Each structure stands twice: as structure tokens, then as C-alpha cells.
Image (cartoon, coloured by chain):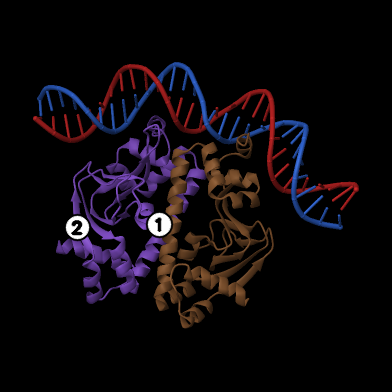
Chain colours: A brown, B purple, C red, D blue
Amino acid sequence: MEEKLHLLRQHFEELFALTDDEWNFVQSHFQYKSLKKHQFLIQTGQPVDFEYWIIKGLVKGYSIDDKGKEHILQFAMENYWVSDHCAFQHQEPGTIFVDCLEDSEFFCLSLENREKICFEVPAVANFFRIKSNHGYINLQQRILSLLTMTAESRYEYLLNKLPKLIQRVPKKLIASYLGVSRETLSRFNS
Amino acid sequence: MEEKLHLLRQHFEELFALTDDEWNFVQSHFQYKSLKKHQFLIQTGQPVDFEYWIIKGLVKGYSIDDKGKEHILQFAMENYWVSDHCAFQHQEPGTIFVDCLEDSEFFCLSLENREKICFEVPAVANFFRIKSNHGYINLQQRILSLLTMTAESRYEYLLNKLPKLIQRVPKKLIASYLGVSRETLSRFNS
DNA sequence: AGCTAATAGTGACCTAAATCACTTTTCAAG
DNA sequence: CTTGAAAAGTGATTTAGGTCACTATTAGCT
């Protein structure tokens, strides 16, 4: 566990250094969780008590439409944060599913604890501020890609941007992430 | 100008209160700017020196594809923040255009000043942290709507969500925001 | 190794929406 | 008020990608 917490500290300190005291305070607000492949981290209708930092593993966040079709909102792996941010922020029942594509481990942060450490340790507030901003920028680029690119070029783009991810994820899920049918994606590779 | 700054203070204090001293410090890091309809706030290839809070007016942020077609990334009006966040954050040349659909007024915040006020006044860091998080949540919902909904239901959804906006913006721009052709949108209303 | 279930590939056909071409309406500037 | 430009509407045609149905491959389990 020591070394896992050390990884989390490194993650925070990629942006701003923390004193040992600050870190001890911050770290005490996280709790550990481990799940096997196929288990759920978040389910629609259930309370979303935490935001999760992924120590190890891979998850998908998705919603299911009225036809039962799955639409992937995000993939998240080591070093990523994941949650149903909307439900978490407003402390409402979940609106999406998040489940594990591989056995995974997490550090969990409740809303109350997040606010606590942000107000106690300014560097942490700034950490989340910058991280959130990066996330915003990424989503903007994804929106632009959905608006401007064909399915095929979105696929090529993703292949270049996250080659490691593609190898860990079945193509039908990539298709769902790109907003294309499995069959159409299959005809691209050529 | 006093009352315009007062609006900005109110905007900050929607989330967290500031002391007069804090506010005076914060406020001194903004500068005022005013533009007429059709003038550019940001252009691709040009430096993006500021993030803008809109006092009054309406702008569109968009990119132009290889066929010369315009794709709208965001509309922003009173009380919204707008910039080419990606270029701004990394201090790189702009990748999108932002121009005014109406005569508009802004308070401008440079990256250096943003970091200054965030590190000096923790409530400001937390303000931007929460704002950024809200922005992230909104973009996630837009992505979901692009993945799961038909063009027509996206339009209905937008009509409900931002009725005021629709009245101020030509429909061809709404179409571009929704990722639909002008002609197709025109056939919806029915 | 052998077997089931998940994943991927492929052909035939269909449909939502894009594109093109043109008309009508609305708006803003002299 | 008039007039030219921008915006909006509409028909005809095309097309990217969806859907359906089936086969082939691959990956976990026991």
C-alpha cells in the first residue's frame, strides 16, 4: 500500500510539490478499493459517493440508450481519474455505468473529503483546477472531432493518440467510443 | 466601470465569498476590452493572451475545416468564460476563431495573472476549479448527446436548455453547433 | 487440449442526413 | 422607404454509415 500511495503522491506532484505534512493530510482522505474484471464501480440510479483515481487497471464509462445500445463516454486507466462527475458533483444518483475491463485498483475520494483537502491545501485546489482544465480541453477536442471528422479519420486519430489503449480494448468498444457501428469500424482497417 | 466590476465580483461570489482586500487584489489583474459585432477576439495562428469573461454580448467559438466549413464549438454570452483554452493554457498559437455575434464587452485575464490570483487567493483557485468542473460536465453531456441522440432530438434538447440563446443566434449557426446541415435543421421545425 | 462465448469480419440492403440548386423571407444600412 | 445581403425554406439526388444476417476467429475456462 505504501508504494501505491507513493504513486498517488507522484501524480499530485507532477503539477505542484507538497510538503510531507500536506501529503500526510491529503493521503488520509483517500480510501483503497479493488475490483475484478466485469465488476461495477458506478451504476445508474445508485449513489456516486466517490471520485476514483486508478492505481492499476482499465475501466469504461458508458450510458445505455432506449434501444439497449451502449455508448462509451470515456476509457480510463492507470493515472486517470474517473467518476460520474455530474452525479458526484451534485450528489445525485448515477446517470452512467462504469465497469472494469480488467482487474483494477482505485483510490477513492469523497466529495466532502475533496473539498476538505482543497480548502486546507491550496496546492491541491490548484492541482484539481489544472487537471479539470486539461479534461475540459480534451473533451473540446473530442467534440471537434465528432463535428468535423469522418468516422474513419476519428479512428486513425485515436490510433495515433492512444495506441496502448486500443490494444487493451475490444474493437467493438472503440467503435462505440467513436460513435460508429462495430461493422463499419471493421471495414476501416483494410 | 465600477458596476461592471461589481458584476464580476458577484460572479466570483456565486461560489465563494471574497474579502474586500481579496477582491481588490483580484480585480486589479483584469483588463477591460470592448468589441463590435463581427470583430475577432481570437484567431487561429495568433497568440491567445487571455481568457475572457463576458460582461455583455455574445460570441461564437469555431473552427474551419479543409472544405471551409465552420464548426461551432461553443456559444458564450453574459457571465460566460471564453477562450481558446487549449492554446491559452499551453501558450501556443490559436487553433480556433472566436468572434462577436453582437457588440460585446469583456474582462480579460492573462495566464500569468490567473495563476497569480489563484495562488494568492485560495477561494479563486477553488472558484476556477469548480467552474472548470462544471464545464467538463457540460461537455460530457454534449458528447453523450452527439453519440446517442438524433440531430432532431439534439435540437429539441437545445431549444429546451437554452431558449434565450436560440433567439439571439441565426439557425445556420445552431445547425453547425449541433453538427447538422442548415438544410436538415430547417426541415425539423415542421 | 477442447469447448463455449465473446469478438471480429463480410455481404446485402436501407436510411438519415449531406449536398446541390434554387426560391422566399428577413434584416440592416444608406 | 428601398435595396442588397444574409438567412431560411424546399425539392431532388447522393452518400456515409447503420442494420441485419451470417461466418470466421480468438480467448477464457474446465
The amino acid at mark 2 is Tyr
Pinpoint the chain carrying mark 2.
Answer: B
In the image, residue A22 sits, relative to residue D16, either above or below, namely below
Give coordinates of residue B32: x percent, y percent. 19, 57
At 42% from the left and 77% from the top, the residue drawn is A121
Is residue B125 among what the camera can see?
yes
Q: Mark 1: which secondary structure?
A: helix
Taking the image as shown, residue B125 lies to the left or right of residue A103, namely left
In the image, residue A141 sits, relative to residue C27, either above or below, namely below
Looking at the rendered image, the quarter that the N terminus of chain A falls into is bottom right
Marks 1, 2 in one chain: yes
Question: Earlier along the polypeptide chain: callout 1 or callout 2?
Answer: 2
- Residue ID for mark 1: B135
The amino acid at mark 1 is Gly
Taking the image as shown, residue B174 lies to the left or right of residue A57, namely left
Give coordinates of residue A44: x percent, y percent. 57, 58
At 37% from the left and 57% from the top, the residue drawn is B89
Taking the image as shown, residue B144 lies to the left or right of residue B36, namely right
Looking at the rendered image, the quarter that the C terminus of chain A falls into is top right
Give coordinates of residue A152: x percent, y percent. 54, 37
Taking the image as shown, residue B34 lies to the left or right of residue A52, namely left
Give coordinates of residue B159: x percent, y percent. 37, 44
Kindly indicate the quadrant of the structure image that contains residue A104: bottom right
At 34% from the left and 73% from the top, the residue drawn is B122
Pinpoint the chain carrying mark 1.
Answer: B
- Residue ID for mark 2: B32
Q: Mark 2: which secondary structure?
A: strand
Mark 1 Cα shell of 10 Å, populated few (<14), some (14-19), many (≥20): some
Q: Nearer the viewer, residue B18 or B49?
A: B49
